[in-house]
Amino acid sequence: MAVDFERIKRDFPILNVKSHGKPLVYLDSAATSQKPRQVIDAVSDFYSNYNANINRGVYEISEKATEAYSNSKNKVSSFINAGGMEEIIYVRNATEAINLVAMSWGDQNIKKGDRILISEMEHHSNIVPWQLLAKKKGAALEYIKLTEDNTRLDMEDLKAKVESGPKLLSITHVSNVLGTINDVKRITEMAHKNGAAVLIDGAQSAPHMAVDVKDIGCDFFAFSGHKMLAPTGIGVLYGKSEVLESMPPFLGGGDMIKTVEKQSATWNDLPWKFEAGTSNIEGGIGLGVAVDYLNSIGMDNITAHESELTEYALSRLDGMSGVSVFGPGQKDLDIKTGVIAFAIKGVHPHDVASIFDNEGVAIRAGHHCAMPLVVGLAPEKAVARMSFYIYNRKEDIDRALKAIETIKRIFKIN
Ligand code: 7TS
């Protein structure tokens, strides 16, 4: 059955807002997504009708809040095909999920002289935690190169570096700048064969495609709720239960313990062992509703919709004078999500984004928290980026193209 994406757009109240007097076109979902009224209402319903702390109350509204929070974990577990809620740890965001692994698993397993392998297309949140760990342990941090055209991982380099036996491979599923989809199943297989643990940064994949962590086979999978219709401040670390069981706690405090004596404590069961202190209850509940919303559309339908938008945008940008587009092109839509980084010759990306803003079109410009990648893409060491989601349609892209024409006129680019 065809999905009515026009109707879906109406679920997002913010898309009725005007920006600089023009209907807002939001093309920055790779930074954070907008929220449907179903999620906004669920958060408001929690505070209006059953706000209470969880996992401790013996009264009705606390039990209701506890149940809603736990249900949300079950939904997230099914959403990524994990083995149950004990494998779903709620954190603030993908960044915290990766830091949790670095500080807990990394502290336990990485020793002097070990190697940690990442790639040149990582977000800072999948770089800096490993730099900190490598420095602390005297380990080496190595990077898988990209192909010469900067569109994808260099699989020869990946193979050589994986075969040289790193302790950990931590890699993004989808680049937040190039939109490249990495073959994480194959990469995980290769890494496991060579004895490495594997973390997949799913911040840019989980919102846009069906994810099956069992099929990928990774040990850890990290993502953020706010990029997939949920509130900010809620993120997910999936870990294989046997791996999580073997790891020391990340933070100490209430809820993560079973018993506490003056000099020692014992740990709570998974996933609570990794969730110290009062949780982001509204965020957890909102994430559960966001997952329901995405499932009601169907992740494959979402992927297909975004792919259609991407093809439409690329076909119009391709060959446009003065405009360069980064990442896989029209012929490689099977490895490309709806993230299009671009540059206009002689115009700083911040000026590009400002003129877009004047036209009511929200895009991001800069290094996109991926400096090791972006500094090599354009002389300004920055690029402009538009990114799509379920509420975007072709007419939004037409507005973006019109903004590009305006820029070319102002800067006299032929
Ligand atoms: N990993 C990737 C691949 C990302 O794109 C981002 C955020 C993160 C991790 C971190 O997510 P957070 O929720 O913990 O902040 N990416 C972007 C972006 O592209 N623009 O703003 C945030």
Image: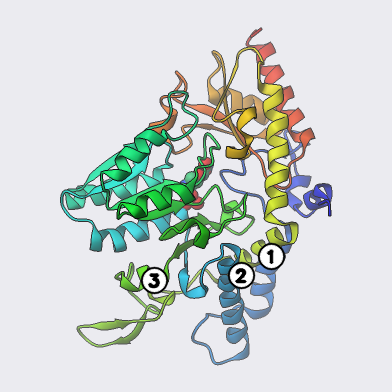
Q: Amino acid at mark 1?
A: Asp
Question: Residue shown at 63%/11% (left/top)?
Answer: 411
Amino acid marked by disc 3 = Phe
Front residue (pair 189, 37)? 189
Q: State whether residue 132 is above or below residue 72.
A: above
Query: Where 280 falls versus 228 (above or below)?
Result: below
Per the image, the residue denoted by label 3 is 274
Q: Is residue 14 left or right of residue 334?
A: right
10 Å crowding of disc 2: few (<14), some (14-19), many (20+):
many
Crowding at mark 3 (Cα within 10 Å: few <14, some 14-19, many 20+): many
> Which of the two marks, 2 or 3, is nearer to us in this view?
2
Residue 325: mark: none
Report the disc number at residue 75: 2
| Contact flag, marks 2 and 1 (Cβ < 8 Å) | yes
The residue labelled by disc 1 is 292
Label 2: which secondary element: helix
Rendered location of residue 234, percent (x, y): 52, 61
At x 62%, y 51%, the residue is 209
Gap between marks 2 and 1, in whole Å?
Answer: 8 Å
Earlier sequence position, callout 3 versus callout 1: 3
Q: Are marks 3 and 1 in contact (CB under 8 Å)?
A: no
